[in-house]
Amino acid sequence: MSDSAARPAAPAHGWRVHAVLLAIQVVFSTLPVATKLVLPVIEPLAISTLRIFGSALAFAAVKWVRTRERVTSRRDLLALAGLALVGVVLNQVLFLLGVARTTAIHANILITIIPVFTLAVALALGRERLSAAKVGGIALAGTGALYLIAARNIAGEGATVLGDGLVAVNAFFYACYLVLSKDLLRR
């Protein structure tokens, strides 16, 4: 019997999922740099307003084309509104105000704490259990971030405690959004 007969076939769409995940990571990691390039021309709140309303229009268009389902439950509508506030509005505003007051390098290093916050929120709400793999992954990411800070001696010309704090709070709100949206979005 050949090796290919013994293994189940991989789903045909598997490469697409990986391509999308790669694209998301590229966008996520270059966002602070792109933001720093745009900030001298457009104010942070103007950028966040454009992104929020532009995204809302894009999602409305996709929903209109792809599905006719409606959210009718008052509870779900309130949950979606709360998620939009936490995961979009507060997330975007805090990120952009923070990046305006820190460096792109600091912002990129600080957003590595999103998984830490996500696990902490999920643990606090009883939605996850602690495991060695989760602790190991967070320790590995933390070690990488600390290495970057130590290796580059990033005092950060142009960085402020306020800017770094705003990016960190942004990471916390995004983590809250990730945990709180999981069940609703799955439905």
Image (spheres, helix red, strand yellow):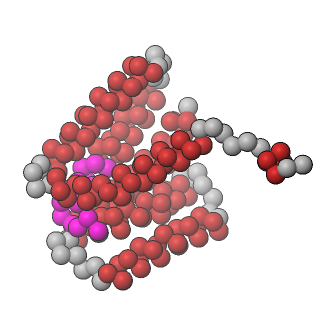
Please state which of residues 172 and 46 is positioned toward the viewer in this rendering. Answer: 46
**Residue 3 to residue 116: above or below:** above
Q: Residue furthest top?
A: 68
Q: Is residue 176 visible?
A: no
Q: Which residues are magenta?
A: 91-105
Q: Residue furthest front?
A: 2
Classify residue 35 as left or right of residue 171.
Answer: left
**Residue 150 to residue 69: above or below:** below
Question: Residue 100: within the magenta?
Answer: yes
Question: Residue 58: within the magenta?
Answer: no
Q: What residue is at 9 percent from the left and 51 percent from the top? A: 41
The count of marks equals: 0
Magenta region, mostly helix, strand or loop?
helix
Please state which of residues 125 and 106 is positioned toward the viewer in this rendering. Answer: 106
Q: Quadrant of residue 123?
A: bottom right
Q: What residue is at 35 percent from the left and 45 percent from the top? A: 86
Residue 150 percent location from the top left of the image:
36, 83
Residue 27 percent location from the top left of the image:
36, 51
Classify residue 171 as left or right of residue 94.
Answer: right
Q: Residue furthest right?
A: 1
Q: Quadrant of residue 98?
A: bottom left
Classify residue 97 as left or right of residue 56.
Answer: left
Q: Is residue 2 visible?
A: yes
Q: Quadrant of residue 103?
A: bottom left
Q: What residue is at 59 percent from the left and 70 percent from the top? A: 136
Residue 125 percent location from the top left of the image:
53, 53
Residue 33 percent location from the top left of the image:
25, 59
Image quadrant holding the C terminus, namely top right
Please state which of residues 94 and 143 is positioned toward the viewer in this rendering. Answer: 143
